[in-house]
Image (spheres, rainbow, N blue to C red):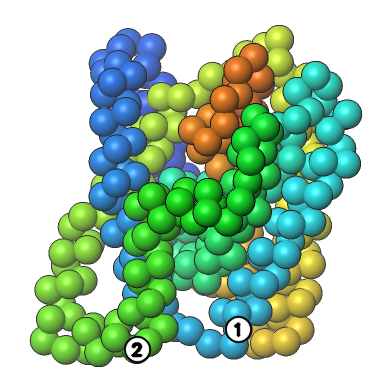
Amino acid sequence: MELDVIRMVLPVLVMIGIGYFCNRKQIFDMNGLKGLKALLGDIMLPVMLFNAFFTAAYSVRVVVVFLVVFIGYGIAIALGYVLRSAVKPYGKYLPFLLASAEGGMLGYALYGLIVGSQSGFAAVDLGQTVFAYTVWLGCLTSVDGEKVDAKALLKNMFSNKCFLGMALGILLGATGIGDLVMNSFAGGIVSQLISTITAPISAVVLLMVGYELNLKKELMGPVLKTIVLRLIIMAGLLVLANMIIFHLFPFDRELEIALMVLYALPAPFIIPIFSDVGKDGEYVSTSLSAHTLVTVILYAMIVVYGMSVL
């Protein structure tokens, strides 16, 4: 089993290391990184999300998982507002670092490496994604004093290609069109096409994570507090989610691993995109970078657990 763990964890560490090396040696600059992000965010991730929800099995359990994850992150963001004084003077961004997760750029990649398929992560990512583009994004936008209304939230949602890919996948999957297509003569062609487009996602994501690693020593006090608070809250949500879901439905090991990966992830990387973080930018980026390293450690632990039971 030790070799299996090394086989799954080592590529993650190596790709992050290569990304960090690319930054230090300027093998490609920030414009190159922007190009990778555009390729990932505009093409690869939307296709991956479309496929995950296009081929997902829809049931009462999916609805329950959605509600558990969505409400759980609602509790997390509320606790973030209560605990803002713990990381003065950066407290206004604490709620957004304690809630939601970087499912698109990290969760699917890590889950897929453990289970062998990324589609199973969709069951837990649905609640996270909808929460991120409604409650989380609405609250984040209001930090800068911008008026938040339904029109603005809808505009943000439907201008994001990842959300559109997910929404289209849900529409076709929930109506049964996905099953019809995949069981037809075109199923093999569609699968191969999607597989070709999405194959590089894990490597590209981890490369970007390594490139953007930025650990500021002077910020490590509030950053460590932020990480500890998030870990405590996410651990509580994981226990609660397992208790509720597997009390109502038969135990599913792959779903359990999906939940473990979800609650091990850092906050969404898009905070600086939707908010003018200003002087708090280094605190936000350092918190995301440091928690990404913690996620890799947690990932190794999840791999050990997964290899022992799958």
Q: Nearer the viewer, residue 147 or 260?
A: 147
Quarter of image, res 304: bottom right
Which label belongs to residue 176?
Answer: 2
Residue found 47% across the figure and 67% down from its top: 122
Q: Residue 290: where, in percent of width, then height?
A: 62, 29
Mark 2, residues whose alpha carbon is within 10 Å: few (<14), some, or many (≥20)? some
Residue found 36% across the figure and 33% down from its top: 207
Mark 1, residues whose alpha carbon is within 10 Å: few (<14), some, or many (≥20)? some
Quarter of image, res 13: top left
Q: Residue 20: where, in percent of width, then height?
A: 41, 22
Q: Residue 302: where, in percent of width, then height?
A: 60, 55
Q: For marks 1 and 2, give the CA distance.
A: 17 Å
Identity of the amino acid at label 1?
Answer: Arg
Which label belongs to residue 161?
Answer: none
Q: Residue 190: where, in percent of width, then height?
A: 17, 72
Which label belongs to residue 61?
Answer: 1
Q: Is residue 140 left or right of residue 86?
A: left
Q: Nearer the viewer, residue 104 or 16?
A: 104
Q: Nearer the viewer, residue 129 or 119?
A: 129
User: On screen, 32 above or below 8?
Assistant: above
Residue found 16% across the figure and 64% down from its top: 193
